[in-house]
Image (cartoon, helix red, strand yellow):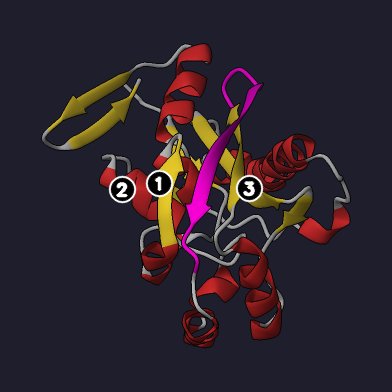
Amino acid sequence: MSYPVFVLASASPTRKKILENAGITPMVRVSYFDEEAIQVSDPTSLVLTLAQCKARAVLPDITQELAGQNALILGCDSIMYLNGLIYGKPESEEVVIATWQKMRGNYCELYTGHCLIDTKTQRTVMRYGVTKVYFSDATDTEIISYADSGEPLCCAGCFTLEKLGGFLIEKIEGCHTNVLGLSLPILRQMLTELGYGIHFSTNGTTIK
């Protein structure tokens, strides 16, 4: 029996690692979609639109590359929503510092949009997750040194949960993998809606 190829339309090593830790070895195809082309003020609409654009950007090449073999293409996008404003990846260390001065002692909502395309049926399913993240009352010294580490420059909202930034997070409410950029519970729901099941074994996870 031929099972679908799982394609991750993202350059994020964290999203790839989430899938690998869950037993799925994805085919990675970066979309190179220009996120600045989408200007939407609503966080839900923004992450869903960007996730769909990323998945659709790789669809033609995947269809040609796999020559008729079924594929499931996943696109994702994450933003931080803080005090009524949307934050993506910061442009500089100065932006990181200024943003963290607003974040400390506060909380944000981390939105991640998911779009899953089934090339066999041409069906598309979209979902988003929201997780509350509470930040510690970080000192100026901690904020400056964290910005200087370079880590927050690669992250939506200027922080990570699983690396250095974890020291500055008090707690979260909701799905923790959603904060990392790919919610496994949401992915399972999407697979179910498309008619797929998940089978676990010592050799990994099979989608069928």
Instruction: Identify the secondary structure beneath mark 3.
Output: strand
- Looking at the rendered image, the disc whose residue lies closer to the viewer, 2 or 1, is 2
Label 2, residues with CA under 10 Å away: few <14, some 14-19, many ≥20: some
The residue at 50%/66% (across/down) is 137
Labels 3 and 1 touching (C-beta < 8 A)? no
Amino acid type at image mark 1: Pro
**Which residue in the structure is indicated by mark 3?**
77
Label 2 or label 1, whichever comes before in sequence order: 2
**With 144 as the anchor, is 171 left or right in this view?**
left
Q: Is residue 18 left or right of residue 122?
A: left
Q: Disc 1 marks which residue? A: 26
Q: Could you say where residue 202 lies in the image, as x and y percent from the top left?
A: 11, 35
Which mark's residue is nearer the viewer, 3 or 1?
Answer: 3
Mark 2 or 3: in front is: 3
Magenta highlight range: 118-137
**Residue 74 image offset from top left, x and y in percent:** 55, 39
